Image: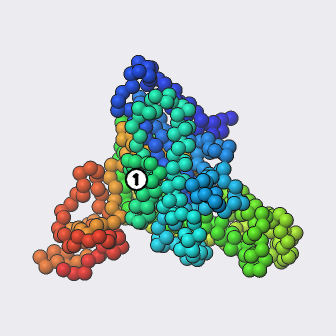
Amino acid sequence: MKTHWDRLAGDVDALSGAVQDTLQLNGGPGAYEADEQLIIALDFGTTFSGIAFCFPNQQDTKVASIVDWPGGESAPKIQTLISYDAKDTNKFSWGASVNRMSDSIIGIKLLLDPSQERPLYLPTGNLQRDIRKLPKKPVNVAADFIHAIYQHALTEITKMVPQGYMSLCQKKFVLSVPAVWSDAAKQATLEAAKMAGIFPVTLIKEPEAAALYTLHSLDFALNVGDAFVVCDAGGGTVDLISYEIVAITPTLQLKELVPGTGGMAGSLGLNQRFLDAVKNLVGEDQYHELRKTKGYWLAERCFDREIKKAYRGDPNEEYFVTFPMADLEDDRGNGLVSNTWRMTGKDMEAIFAPLITDILRLIDDQVKSVKIKRPDKGITGICLVGGFGSSQYLKACVEKEHPNVQVLQPNDAWAAIAKGAALSSLPRKASVISTSSTKHYGIELWEIKDDGKDGGQPTQNWRDGTTRVAKVGPPIPPPRGLHGRWVSIVRVCLSHTTSDELVHPGR
Ligand SMILES: Nc1ncnc2c1ncn2[C@@H]1O[C@H](COP(=O)(O)OP(=O)(O)OP(=O)(O)O)[C@@H](O)[C@H]1O
Ligand SMILES: [Mg+2]
């Protein structure tokens, strides 16, 4: 039976073959067209990063992922890890080549804007202290990682297409960022990309990229008018947007139904909560010693790679975590014997609980907003993508909460963000034709209230005798700009007003 990776490798073979076909059609290497392009899409994730690429001028363009990585790893994404040489910060190892026992940097993406709100259930680690401990500024660390992964991608792509063709191609980049990323974080990401030699860059929202790819792969099973909530649950963030299918042929066209939402309820939080649970189990003093041992790292790895993925919600299930070579006091009452902790399904439930609650609330908010927008049609499905999105437990929880909606975990969902980001550069295949604004810069749009459509919205009575509602999240069909009447420029300001704040005191 073909494995997932065989299929990915198949993608790459098909792509490589198609490029060769293009060369043949163009009359061989001497007859390249000057406007050949290579699109490289980077999903710079908190815990894992991936790269997808395509040659848009090719006939029947296909998007492929890089699946071979230094360190012998074969997967559509590689750990976003970097470890600097203690003596020379120009030297570093990254991805699977990093020795995890060394002082490696994880979650650099979350340090790009440390002022972003973090959920209360995560340990109150001192972010400023974490940043001070770095050998370079977060943006420089991100730039080093991006440069390394990009150079590796170029090497891999060059293995598939002739060198001459590669150097002729104009390279364009698409970088995915969480839908809820602050402007400062987006700016820092762009800066890091520029330092890494990546330019010009188009940014795309991670769940938008995920939606483009997953719905494009599902288009045979879609109907015009279907609506999907796409939830990208990753390592650091959980991002959601909802889309309606506007057209399927000749190209898939999506309309964003409600503005993107999200939070920091990613799977890294499970690891942090697991380590907190270990601290509670063994006590501060033993924990302090344990942290210095290889056993601690091996136990965290076992939780990260196996246990959290295996949990399906059964309270009677048992999971064994071993801290090899540690010298922990037995605590039979709590299941700690001979340096092995017998975790129960209940322990696992407690670790997952606040993150699951957060994700369910985020999904519920999207579902409710879609239902308000389409009271007669409701929602067709909820797509879970991203690493955490592949959790069977998360799926079961979402199904329980939304018994009448189909919950989908599409095949290839882990690579969906990078592939969707590359696909966004191929509008003849799939595109988002209308988005909803999440922020408004200096301009507020108030329209005369329509009792039929605007029930429940905050209103204002204007001097002209009209009752107006603030238009939050109106559809913006690119490239023509906002539809609707611009009624007032209240101020040109540098700061933004968020959707929630878009209620101006009476004027
Ligand atoms: N079945 C699972 N249950 C819980 N977590 C999982 C599961 N499978 C993978 N993960 C976690 O998902 C994360 C990787 O997912 P992904 O690549 O989508 O995240 P990311 O892109 O690094 O993060 P972000 O999108 O938040 O920046 C890792 O933290 C991994 O441990
Ligand atoms: Mg991600």
The image quarter in which residue 365 lies: bottom left
- Nearest the viewer among 72 and 338 is 72
Q: Amino acid at mark 1?
A: Leu
- Report whether residue 164 is seen: yes
Q: Position of residue 264 (x, y in %)?
A: 52, 67
Q: Residue at x 46, y 43 (%)?
A: 40
- Report whether residue 56 is seen: no
Mark 1 lies on residue: 203
Q: Is residue 329 left or right of residue 193?
A: right
Label 1 SS: strand
Where the N terminus falls, by quadrant? top right
Q: How is the image coloured?
A: rainbow
Image height check: is 64 above or below 460? Answer: above
Q: Position of residue 20 (x, y in %)?
A: 49, 25
Image height check: is 326 above or below 200? Answer: below
Q: Residue at x 62, y 71 (%)?
A: 353
The image quarter in which residue 12 lies: top right
Give the residue furthest to the left.
464
- Nearest the viewer among 31 and 273 is 31
Q: Residue at x 28, y 52 (%)?
A: 477
- Bin the neighbour count of mark 1 within 10 Å (Cα to Cα): few under 14, some 14-19, many 20 and up: some
**Beta carbon at label 1 within 8 Å of ligand 2:** no
Where the C terminus falls, by quadrant? bottom left
Image height check: is 472 above or below 306? Answer: below
Image height check: is 440 above or below 175? Answer: below
Q: Position of residue 399 (x, y in %)?
A: 57, 60
